[in-house]
Image (tube, rainbow, N blue to C red):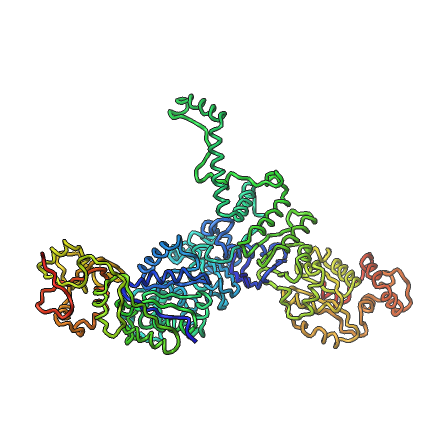
Amino acid sequence: MPSASRVLISAAGGGKTTRVVDQALASDKGVTALVTYTRNNVREIQIKASARTRAIPPNIEVISWYTFLLRELARPYRSAVHKRRIEGIHWVEGKSVPFIPEFKTNAHYFLDGGRIYSDKIAKFVCECNRKSNGAVMRRLKQRFNHIIIDEVQDMAAYDLDVLEMILQADIPMTLVGDHRQAILSTNNSPKNKKFSGPAILQKFELWKKKGLLEVDYETHTHRCNQEIADLGDSFFPNDKKTVSKNKIITGHDGIFLVASSDVDEYMQRFSPQVLRFSVKTSCGEHDAMNFGEAKGLTFPRVLIFPHVSAKSWLASGKLSHVEKSAAKMYVGVTRARYSVAFVYDGKTCGISAERWVKS
Amino acid sequence: MYIQRVVIKNYRCLKEADVALNQNLNVIVGNNECGKSTLLEAIHLALSGQLNGRPLQMELHPYLFNAELVLEYFVRLTRGETPEPPSILIELYLADDPALSKLKGTNNTLGLDLPGVSLTIKLNPALSDEFAQYVSDPSEIRTVPIEYYMHEWMGFHETPILNAREIPLNSSLIDASNIKNNAAASRYIVDIVKESLSAKEKVDLALTYRLMKHRFLEQPKVQTINDALAAKRGMVSEKAISLSLDTSARATWEAGIMPHLDDIPLPLVGKGEQNAVKIKLAMETSAKSHIILIEEAENHLSYSSLNELIGHISENAGDRQIFITTHSSFVLNKLGVESVLLFQRGASVRLNELQDGTTRDYFMKLPGHDTLRLILSKRTILVEGPSDELIVQRAYQKKHGKMPLQDGIDVISVNSLAFKRFLAIAVLLKKETDVVTDNDGSVDALKKKYADYLQAQGVSIQYDDDEKANTLEPQLMKKNGLKIINDVLEKAFETEEDAIDFMIKNKADTGLRFFETPIAWDAPDYIARAVR
C-alpha cells in the first residue's frame, strides 16, 4: 500500500514555500500543521499565506519546529518522564551537559528542572512517547489531519527520530526540503550523525524502503537560468539535474570571473549582491552576506568572494576542494536569477565561466 | 463536546470536590449553601476566565479561598509551622473529542489522558519573598493577601490559555439572582442578543445608531437651541457651547439600546418573566454555546410559567450540556430523575450511576419529592409504614421538644422492600440514616436482609432482638404494659394479646392515638435509639 506521506525534494528556486502554503490552504479537512525550522520561516510563510487568502484560516497552524516539539509533543505527557512543568527551552550551542548520564533525567534534560536543553528536547519527546505507551503520538494523530514540515533538510539527530515516530504513527506528513541546502542543523547531538547535512537524503531513502513515505523530486527552478542551475548541480554530481524555467535574457547572463582590480567597476555596472562563505573572507569595502544568511533569498545577480578552498576549486575544477562546503556553495550560487560572478585573479580556470573585462 | 468531570480544590465553599457529570442534562440538587452555585460559577470561570463578567485577575478577592482552609493555614502559621500557602484549583475533564485534542494531556491531578482545562490561583513565585514578609506576623492577618497572587490558566497539555477562544467549548451562565440593578439586566440581555446577531447585523445596528445621533443634530429645533447657546459665548466659557450626542466609541449602540418585551422596557417587566426570557434567549442564541449553566430556574416564576420554561429547556437542549440547580421537586420530576446529580459540599452522586439497576429504576420512577427529601435532609429515619412514622415522630418530639423536621431530620415512610434502595443512595451520599424495622420474628433473616449495611458508615439498622415481639405493636406493649396501652387507646382490654390484636387490626388509628395522647408512654428501645 502506498504511504500517505511523502518527501518532496525541490531544487533551489523551485517555489517550495509557495507550494507548501498552497498545499496547506487546499486542505479543508481537520487541522493542518505547517511546521518550519526558524521563526523567520514562520513569518515568511505567514506573509505568503496572507498574500493568497485574506487571513490564514483557523484550521492551519503555522508553528516553528521548537514550538511544535515543546507544545505538541513534550509538554502534554511530560509527567511520564519528568515531574515538573516544562517552562521553556534553554538554548545551547553545541552539546549541553555532556557528562551527565541519561538516567539522571532531571539534570540530563533540564536546566534548573524547568527549562529543557534545546539539543535534548527531541530526545525527550521520544522518551515520553515510549514511557507513555504511545500517548504522545495518539494525541498528535487526533490533533492534526496533516503535518507539513518545511526545510526538512535542517533536521538532524533525534529530530529525525521524532519524524520517523510520526511516520510510524501513520499521521499523514509532507516533508519539503532540499538536501543540497542542508547547512543549518537543529541539533548538534551525535545521534544520526551520518545523516547530517546533504546525507539526509539517505535517511529519506531508508524511510522509503520501510514503506513510510514516497520520495518525489521537483527538478525545475523558476529562479536560476540554466547555466546557474548547472553550476549548482555540479556540486552534487550524483543528484538529479535541474531544469531551468527562467528564460529571460538580460545581456549579462551566466557565470563570470572578475579580476579583483575590476570589482568596483563591476559593482557599479551590475550592482550584484556580494556573498561570501563566512566573515573570514575579506570583501573589502563591500557589504557582504554569508551564504548561510542568504538562504531562502533571491537576488538578480551575485558576486562571490571565494574562500581559500573555493579558489582552489575555481583553479582546478576539482570538487574535492569544496566537498565539505558543497551545500553552502550550492546555496550561494543558486541565489541569483541571471548571473553569478567570482572575484578571481588566477590564470587557470577549471569551471566553465567567462572572464569579464572592462570595456 | 462536554465536560465529564470537575475537580475543585479550595474554591469558596468547595474544599474538595470531584463531580462526575452527565453528557446532556444535569439537574443539580442539594441543600442551601451546599455549593451548587459555586460549582456552576467554577465551571464557568474555568471555561471563560471570567468571574462576575470580568477577567479573573480583576476580580480576585480573598473570599474566593475556602474559609476553612485559610483558617487552618493561619492557625498553623501561628503555631510556628510553615504550611503551604493557600491555593485554588479548578479542573474540567472534557470528553475525548478530536476537536478538543489541543487541550489533551495527562497534566491533571487525576493523571487522566484527556482534554481539559485547569485554572489555578496561587502565590506568584516572583513575589514569594514579599509574601513571606507579609505573613511573618500571622496574628495580624485574617485573609489571604490577594495582591501576591496570580492565576494560571492552562490546558491539560500544559501550555497557557491566553484567550477563552482557545477552548472550543463556550459556556453561558444564566444567573438571574446575581443581576442587581436594571442597567445590568438590560446589558445582560443585550449581550445575549448580540451573540445571536451576524457580523453584518451588528455593523448595521452600529451604523444606524450613529446615523440617528447625527440626524438629531440636524433637527431644526435642536439647531435653534444650539444657535441660541452659541450666542451666549463668553458667559460660561470663551468657547462656543453646543449640544450634541456622544458618538465616541464609548457610546456604542450596546450602551444606548434597551430591550423591550411587548413594547415594555425589560427592567419594568416582572422579575419572573425577565428570568424566563433570559433563559430562553440564552438557549436560543447559544447555537455556539455548548454549555449552559442555569441558576435556580424556578426563581420568581409561577407554577405555570415554570412549567412552560422547563418544557422549553428540555425541548431545546439539543446536544448541549445543560446544568440547572434547583430546589424544586417539580423541576426535578419534569426534567427526569435520571439526570439528577445529588450534590453536597463537593460529594456528588448521579442517580444513573447507581450500581444496582433495580435501585436506579426505583428512583427514576419515584416521584421527585421523596428523592429530594432524602437528599435535602440532614439525617434520615426510614420507617416501615404510617403508624411507625407517627410513633417515631412523637417519640422524637417527646425527647427533643420539637418535631424532627425542625432539626432537619426527615422521617420517611417506605415500603419495606424499598429500604435497601434508599440505603444505597444514603451510603453514596454519606447521609446519616437510621432504619427502624420490625424483626418479623427472625433476627437472622433480618441480618441477612441488611447484611450489606450492618457495617456501613453512617447507617444504623435499629431493631429489637426479642423475636417474640416481632412487630411494632408487641414492642409497644412490652415497653409500656397493658395499663398504659389501655389508657392511650381509651380501651379496657383484659389481656395483652387482645390489646395487641386490636392494635394490629387498627394500625393507623393506633398510631394516631399514640401521636395525640397526652398520656406519657415510652418508645421501644430500638426506636429510642433512632431518635437519640
Left or right: B501 as drawn, with respect to A46 = right
List x then y, in percent, for residue B232: 42, 21
Task: Name the quadrant of the C terminus of chain B.
Answer: bottom right
Q: Is residue B382 above or below residue A50?
A: below
Q: Nearer the viewer, residue B446 or B356?
A: B356
List x then y, in percent, for residue A84: 41, 66
List x then y, in percent, for residue B211: 47, 36
Total tally of numbered discs in the picture: 0
Q: Nearer the viewer, residue A241 or B487?
A: A241
The residue at the point 46 percent across, 53 percent down is B141
List x then y, in percent, for residue B413: 75, 63
Q: Nearer the viewer, residue B151 or B128?
A: B151
Occupied quadrant, residue A28: bottom left
Q: Nearer the viewer, residue B121 or B293?
A: B293
User: Is residue B81 something that shows in the picture?
Assistant: no
Occupied quadrant, residue A35: bottom left
Left or right: A168 as drawn, with respect to B176 = left
User: Is residue A244 something that shows in the picture?
Assistant: yes
> In the image as oriented, which residue stretches furthest toward the bottom?
A209
Left or right: A315 as drawn, with respect to A108 = left
Left or right: A206 as drawn, with respect to B387 = left
